[in-house]
Image (spheres, rainbow, N blue to C red):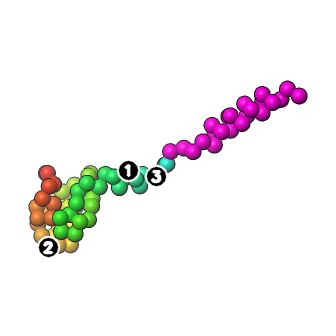
Amino acid sequence: MGNGAKAAQKRERNADKNAPKGSKSQAKVNEAAKSIVCATCKQSFLITTRAPALEEHSSNKHSKTMAECFPTFAK
């Protein structure tokens, strides 16, 4: 007898250990960071994408200039 308090404390500690942690995946964050969109095909790119990659996309995929595919992109 008298072990009821110990059992309750152990349940509380285990509940803290088994509490769901935040997601470790970056997928949602990366999806939200895709703010550069091609005007021709509507493909989205991460905000950290640099001009050479966008220029390569526009010339290889659409045979257009970067300004035609990405009019809102600021250099």
Determine which of the numbered discs, if any, sits on residue 41 in the image: none
Quarter holding residue 17: top right
Q: Which residue is mark 1?
A: 29
Determine which of the numbered discs, if any, sits on residue 63 in the image: 2
**Dot 2 or dot 1, earlier in sequence:** 1
**In front: mark 2 or mark 1?**
1
Which residue is at the front of the view, 13 or 26?
13
Amino acid type assigned to the residue bearing label 1 in the image:
Val
Q: Secondary structure at mark 3?
A: loop
Q: Residues within 10 Å of mark 2 (few under 14, many from 20)?
A: few
The CA distance from mark 3 to mark 2 is: 36 Å
Which residue is at the front of the view, 42 or 51?
42
Q: Which residue is mark 3?
A: 25
Magenta region, residue range? 1-22
Residue at the far right in the pictured view: 1
6 is higher (above) or lower (below) than 66: above
Residue 36: image location, x then y, percent: 23, 56
The CA distance from mark 3 to mark 1 is: 8 Å
Amino acid type assigned to the residue bearing label 2 in the image:
Ser
Identify which residue is drawn at 78% across, 29% down: 6
45 is higher (above) or lower (below) than 9: below
Q: Secondary structure at mark 2?
A: loop
Amino acid type assigned to the residue bearing label 3 in the image:
Ser
